[in-house]
Amino acid sequence: MVSRQDMGSWLDGPPRDGSQYPGQRWGRPERGPGSIARFAPRLIALVMDWFLAMVLAGLFFSRWNGSGLMTLAVFFVLTALMVGFFGRSPGHWLLGLQVQTMDGRPAGFGRAVLRTLLLCLLIPPLVADEDQRGLHDRAVDTVLVRVR
């Protein structure tokens, strides 16, 4: 009889033989600067950015009760501008991460706007490939890497 373990799960991601680490096929190191950012630092940076957006939305837009939508708008503007100009959001900055193109340059403004728009949809970052790139990164040909 075939069991669930034999079939695997979509949560397991694509099958890997265990000999390849995220980013290896692009010549990225396994650890340290230039390596692909793992899930935990990505999540922590996202939570930090969202919290900052909540604080800013509360400070500047407190007279509107639709703070959830305002928080999303502030998150979008803050993240798109920071990633566009500096290659990193405030959360990325604190955790030593940077959004780069596949050839190692900062993402740039156009890619940052589209990437952030897709990030705000929430589903694209939850669907990742074997190199831990979400659909939002794949769509604009970027990768989130460690820079320290």
Image (cartoon, grey):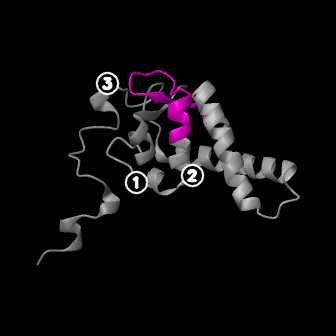
Q: Is residue 67 above or below residue 99?
A: below
Closest to the observer, 11 or 49: 49
Task: Answer above or below: position of 37 versus 125.
Answer: above
**Element at label 2:** helix
Where is mark 1, residue-wise? 127
Residue 100 on the magenta span: yes
Give the amino acid at mark 2: Cys
**What is the magenta range?**
95-114
Q: Secondary structure at mark 3?
A: loop
73 vs 126, nearest the viewer: 73
Mark 3–mark 2 Cα distance, whole angstroms, equals: 30 Å
Instruction: Tell me the crowding category of disc 1: few under 14, some 14 to 19, or many 20 or more residues within 10 angstroms, Cα based.
Output: some
Marks 1/2: CA–CA distance: 14 Å
Q: Which residue is mark 3?
A: 27
- Please provide percent x and percent y for residue 50: 67, 50
Residue 87 in picture, x, y percent from top left: 57, 28
> Which residue, as the protein is rendered here, is positioned at the far left?
1
Q: Nearer the viewer, mark 1 or mark 2?
A: 2
Residue labelled with disc 2: 120
